[in-house]
Amino acid sequence: MFGFIPNLLHAAEHSGLSLAGNNALLIQWGAVLGASLVAAGWDLHSRRIPNVLTLPLFVAGLAWNIGTGGVFGAATSLSGAVIAALPFVLLFLYAGGGAGDAKLMGAIGAWLGLAQGVAVLLMVVLAGAALGLAQAAWQKKFRYTTARMGQLAQVWMGSIVLGQRPVLAPLDDVAPLQMPYGVSIFSGVVLAAVGVMLWNA
């Protein structure tokens, strides 16, 4: 039973590569880089990431992985979508996060699969934390923002590890940061893409 997990990871890493070696990687990462760049611009302009971008991106990513990897391609595409989107779904449900952020991350995961989806998720979280702290310092809301980040970490841990429904306590009367998270997603995708390309060079 547990032997399925290494096989899925292997498929996630190599799904599509049989078509044209690293050209498949370029197609996958080109698609998510382009889409996340558009999403960042859209989010900066209107503070939203629309379904007209995220839904076609998800469908195309799923179709790509099915076409290049068959059943394993479908499995790694869907698992990548779930792992990349889940933290942002929790933020949407419990902490006022954006639904568009969750949908975009799911679509990116559908293109990249499980292993690369995890890499993107980690880089997006790091980029979001760095940009958020920089903005907080600029707007003199550093203490509020670090406290809220601690609460958000509890949301993820409580929901994923303990299965608890978390509740965010109010923090002072300071207005929260209004940060277009699409920029953080694009930044994280860029960092992950550079890492993957260097790894496969």
Image (cartoon, rainbow, N blue to C red):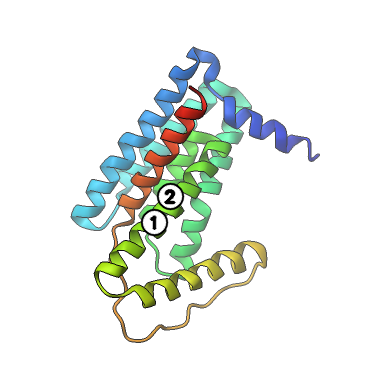
Q: Residue at x 51, y 28 (%)?
A: 199
Check disc 1: other Cα within 10 Å, few if <14, some if 14-19, many if 20+.
Answer: many
Q: Position of residue 90 (x, y in %)?
A: 50, 62
Q: Residue furthest bottom?
A: 172
Residue 128 disc label: 1
Categorize mark 2 by other alpha carbons within 10 Å: few (<14), some (14-19), many (20+).
Answer: many
Secondary structure of the residue carrying tag 1 is helix
For the residues labelled 1 and 2, the Cα–Cα distance comes to 6 Å
Looking at the image, which residue is at 54% across and 44% down?
Answer: 118
Where 186 sits versus 77, above or below? below
As rendered, which of 148 and 3 lies closer to the eye?
148
Is residue 193 shown above or below 44?
above
Q: Which mark is residue 150?
A: none
Question: Disc 1, disc 2: CB below 8 Å?
Answer: yes
Q: Quadrant of residue 133?
A: bottom left
Quarter of the image with the N terminus is top right
Q: Residue at x 49, y 34 (%)?
A: 112
Q: Amino acid at mark 1?
A: Gly
Q: Residue furthest top?
A: 20
Q: Is residue 48 left or right of residue 45?
A: right
- Residue 124 marker: 2
Q: Is residue 142 left or right of residue 192?
A: left
Q: Amino acid at mark 2?
A: Val
Q: Establish if 153 lies above or below 17.
A: below
Give the x, y percent position of residue 55.
38, 42
Residue 167, visible in the rendered structure: yes
